[in-house]
């Protein structure tokens, strides 16, 4: 038996690793789409408000609790909560911080394989599919197997699986090399490379001018306007309710003068339709704007994932957490707002006009629209490769971070070495990943996992963290703990924010999320129409795959719950005669790999 | 691109860029940790770890 104790080798290393875990596909694909959809004026107000009262405070709390647990010999979320709560139930609460990253990894790595494949395809010219977006949609659908279950496994269409095996192996190679030689080493090179590639692509997009003289309105300035202009024009349709004035429901968002003019003529002959300009103040009264902005901040920063708490546990007692946490957060914001906000939507608008950005989700923008956009640029192979390779770097630094909480838990919970824990986690995640790839029709398994684990569980974990910090540990003690070794004082107002505002804001946002995205509440009519996430599970239109997925999630929960029980017994035994609250606690012994 | 659009873009992009550069400056220039020589203050003993 040999004691294994890992530590970060440098401060910049941990900052880049945390920033790497946060910067992902959402920075370049999800954020710009949301800002354009809701009108940047209102969206950015809600976005920065959420950053100040939700993102940064929870981030500081998670860094602080992670370092606190690490000083007491624990590096996994169950171990850290075991020592924080000092009750057997603690390890079961903390196990959420392992389940979330492990399950999210099982589908995230598949998406990571797509972006690597697309970057390679641009280099080889395989993505030169012409000028029709339908061709790109068809290519992506067949490539990921969204046309039928098991389609990705067919002999004629197995490229996605090959790329999946490559990225899976890469992830486990780096995670096997350990915290310093694997994660820290990789992020030290990957993060600067990502920022550099993004700057090159950004310069290219901003110097495109007006690529098609026949369409002078599709230029860089209008492209930026489609992203940043605060007011949005929407096509609305009247919904008649007997005995009440009609309710105007949004049908389509228009972003440029030409499409507005065309739509004016079209709807002039359509009764019950109108064009409506939404002002900033009107948008701010829309709860969906606040929900979208808070959700973006929340998922983008990766708070509540169980990653920051694990990474911070490898800090030393007097290592700063305040400035480090803020730096990692600001790196994520820089990539999201200053790079993602200036590249994706303007590029799509310049080549495709409003049709390229309106109503596109993350996958629509990333894998259907942008490949066409880059193929229309001069030197498509170079800039297409650059863009998708930077997405790959963003994705792999995130997926690597999703493995470490699981590795740390298996090592310290079961007392096994790195080799064994890597092998075991590899097997677990391979099973989950095979499930996602097998049930690929309409990406139902992926979508169901993302909703219940990547969203609902995440809200739960973040709520637990901020409530623990502000109320159970106590804000005064938490404050003191955060400032141990800090190189920056947190403004005093954040005491109030972290104790009252952040938990309340989080609970309200979670409530709104359930109301809109689960129960399908329509505030205009007051009607409830359960969303597909509910109807997929119960009722006459239930989806077999969605139900299987929920069963798989339950199996993961039970499995890790059992491991937490085994780990708890081990920790109880190891802590007999010692006070767990003491930083001098010897970490549980692990066998050398 | 309207004037208000320009203002929102410059404030948003400028704000996060300034914050990021300032944080990086504080981390890299003010507290170099590469090749740092440890002094008496850096030695951690169990009594200094007690709450």
Image (spheres, rainbow, N blue to C red):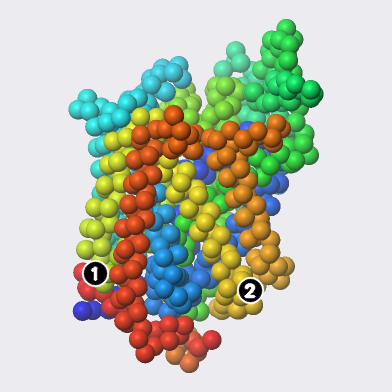
* Residue A492 occupies quadrant: bottom right
Residue A315, position in %: x, y? Answer: 45, 73
Q: Residue at x 57, y 39 (%)?
A: A519
Q: Is A213 on the left or on the right of A585, as rendered?
A: right
Q: Of residues A93 and A278, which is closer to you in this image?
A: A93
Q: Residue A104, how many percent across, how many down?
A: 40, 49
**Residue farthest toward the top in the current orientation of the protein:** A269
Relative to residue A444, is residue A585 depicted above or below? below
Whether tag 2 and tag 1 are in contact, CB under 8 A, the answer is: no
Give me the C-alpha separation between circle 2 and circle 1: 36 Å
**Number of marks:** 2
In the image, which disc is placed on residue A475? 2
Is residue A239 rendered to the left or right of residue B36?
right
Q: From where the camera sits, is residue A206 visible?
A: no
The quarter of the displayed image where residue A347 is located? top right
Residue A559 in picture, x, y percent from top left:
31, 58
Residue A85 in sight from this viewpoint:
yes
Few, some or many C-alpha atoms within 10 Å of disc 2 (few <14, some 14-19, many ≥20)?
some
Other-residue count near label 1 (Cα within 10 Å), few / some / many at <14 / 14–19 / ≥20: many
Q: Quadrant of the C terminus of chain A?
A: bottom left
Q: Is residue A345 above or below residue A466?
A: above
Query: Could you tell me which residue is drawn at 32 percent across and 71 percent down?
Result: A567
Q: Which mark is residue A416?
A: 1
């Amino acid at each position: 038996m040999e004691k294994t104790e890992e530590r970060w080798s440098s401060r910049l290393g941990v900052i880049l690793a945390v920033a790497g875990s946060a910067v992902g596909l959402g920075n370049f694909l999800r954020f710009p789409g949301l800002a354009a959809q809701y009108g940047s004026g209102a969206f950015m107000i809600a976005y920065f408000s959420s950053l100040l009262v939700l993102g940064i405070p929870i981030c500081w709390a998670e860094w602080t609790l992670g370092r606190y647990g690490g000083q007491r010999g624990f590096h996994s979320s169950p171990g850290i909560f075991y020592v924080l709560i000092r009750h057997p139930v603690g390890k079961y609460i903390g196990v959420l911080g392992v389940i979330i990253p492990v399950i999210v990894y099982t589908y995230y790595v598949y998406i990571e394989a797509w972006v690597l494949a697309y970057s390679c395809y641009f280099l080889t010219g395989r993505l030169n599919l012409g000028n029709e977006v339908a061709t790109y949609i068809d290519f992506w659908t067949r490539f990921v197997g969204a046309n039928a279950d098991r389609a990705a496994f067919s002999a004629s269409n197995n490229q996605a699986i090959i790329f999946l095996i490559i990225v899976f192996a890469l992830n486990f190679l780096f995670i096997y090399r350990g915290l310093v030689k694997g994660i820290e080493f990789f992020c030290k090179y990957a993060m600067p490379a990502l920022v550099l590639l993004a700057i090159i692509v950004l310069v290219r997009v901003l110097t495109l001018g007006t690529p098609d003289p026949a369409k002078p309105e599709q230029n860089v300035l209008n492209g930026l306007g489609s992203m940043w202009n605060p007011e949005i024009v929407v096509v609305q349709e009247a919904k008649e309710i007997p005995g009440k004035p009609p309710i105007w429901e949004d049908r389509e968002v228009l972003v440029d003068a030409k499409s507005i003019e065309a739509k004016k003529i079209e709807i002039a002959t359509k009764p019950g339709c109108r064009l409506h300009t939404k002002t900033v103040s009107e948008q701010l009264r829309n709860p969906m704007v606040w929900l979208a902005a808070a959700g973006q901040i929340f998922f983008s920063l990766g708070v509540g994932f169980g990653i920051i708490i694990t990474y911070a546990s490898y800090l030393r007692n007097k290592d700063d957490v305040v400035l480090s946490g803020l730096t990692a957060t600001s790196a994520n914001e820089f990539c999201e707002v200053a790079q993602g906000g200036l590249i994706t939507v303007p590029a799509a608008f310049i080549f495709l006009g409003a049709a390229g950005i309106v109503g596109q989700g993350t996958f629509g923008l990333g894998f259907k629209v942008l490949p066409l956009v880059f193929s229309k640029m001069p030197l498509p192979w170079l800039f297409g490769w650059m863009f998708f390779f930077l997405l790959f770097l963003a994705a792999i630094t995130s997926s690597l971070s999703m493995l470490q909480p699981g590795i740390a838990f298996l090592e310290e919970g079961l007392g096994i070495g790195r080799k064994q824990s890597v092998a075991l986690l590899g097997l677990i995640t391979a099973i989950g990943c095979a499930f996602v790839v097998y049930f690929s029709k309409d990406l139902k398994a992926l979508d169901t996992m993302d909703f219940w684990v990547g969203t609902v569980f995440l809200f739960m974990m973040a709520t637990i963290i901020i409530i623990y910090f502000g109320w159970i540990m106590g804000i005064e003690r938490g404050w003191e703990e955060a400032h141990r070794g800090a190189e920056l004082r947190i403004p005093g107002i954040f005491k109030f924010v972290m104790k009252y505002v952040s938990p309340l804001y989080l609970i309200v946002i979670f409530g709104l999320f359930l109301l809109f995205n689960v129960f399908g509440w329509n505030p205009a009519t007051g009607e409830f129409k359960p969303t597909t996430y509910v109807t997929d599970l119960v009722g006459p239109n239930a989806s077999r795959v969605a139900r299987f997925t929920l069963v798989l999630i339950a199996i993961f929960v039970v499995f890790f719950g059992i491991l937490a029980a085994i780990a708890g017994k081990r920790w109880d035994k190891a802590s007999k005669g010692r006070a767990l609250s003491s930083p001098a606690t010897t970490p549980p012994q692990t066998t050398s790999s | 691109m309207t004037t208000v659009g320009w203002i929102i873009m410059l404030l948003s992009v400028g704000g996060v860029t300034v914050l990021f550069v300032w944080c990086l400056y504080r981390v890299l220039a003010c507290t170099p940790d590469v090749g740092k020589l440890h002094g008496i203050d850096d030695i951690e003993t169990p009594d200094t770890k007690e709450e």
